[in-house]
Amino acid sequence: MTRHDHPAATYEARIRRVTRYIVDTPDGDLSLDALADVAAMSRFHFHRVYAAMTGETVAQAVRRLRLHRAGKWLVQGVIR
């Protein structure tokens, strides 16, 4: 079994895909169901895997990334 065949490598790739999706579409549908579809997992399995691999829930990650974007806008003067 190669590293790319290992389940953890597959999960890492799926989590990276979801994170990229959140960053690229922060105003889109970022519900657990939608993000589980991006990861190609059931919503329950995705929630467990995401939390185990990232140390935060999907909702916490979405909130953190949206707050980071808002903070950047404040610093750049986009939001007054």
Image (cartoon, helix red, strand yellow):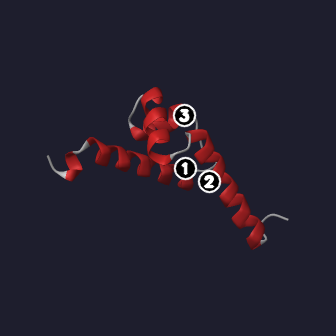
Query: Where is residue 62 shown, x and y percent of the image?
Result: 61, 46
Lower position in the chain sequence, tag 2 or tag 3: 3
Does residue 29 appear anywhere in the picture?
A: no
Using residue 26 as the reference point, say whether residue 1 is left or right of it. Answer: left
Residue on which the image places disc 2: 65
Residue extending farthest to the right is 80
Closer to us: 25 or 67 = 67
Query: Where is residue 75 shown, x and y percent of the image?
Result: 75, 71
Closer to us: 76 or 68 = 68
Residue extending farthest to the left is 1
Q: CA distance from mark 2 to mark 3?
A: 15 Å
Q: Residues within 10 Å of mark 2 (few under 14, many from 20)?
A: some
Q: Amino acid at mark 3?
A: Leu
For the residue labelled by badge 2, is the local secondary structure a helix, a strand or a loop? helix
Lower position in the chain sequence, tag 1 or tag 2: 1
Q: CB atoms at circles 1 and 2 under 8 Å apart?
A: yes
Q: Residues within 10 Å of mark 3 (few under 14, many from 20)?
A: some
Residue on which the image places disc 1: 22
Marker count (numbered) = 3
Residue occupying image coordinates x 61% and y 40%: 59
Residue on which the image places disc 3: 32
Query: Where is residue 42 shown, x and y percent of the image?
Result: 42, 28
Lower position in the chain sequence, tag 3 or tag 1: 1
Closer to us: 26 or 49 = 49
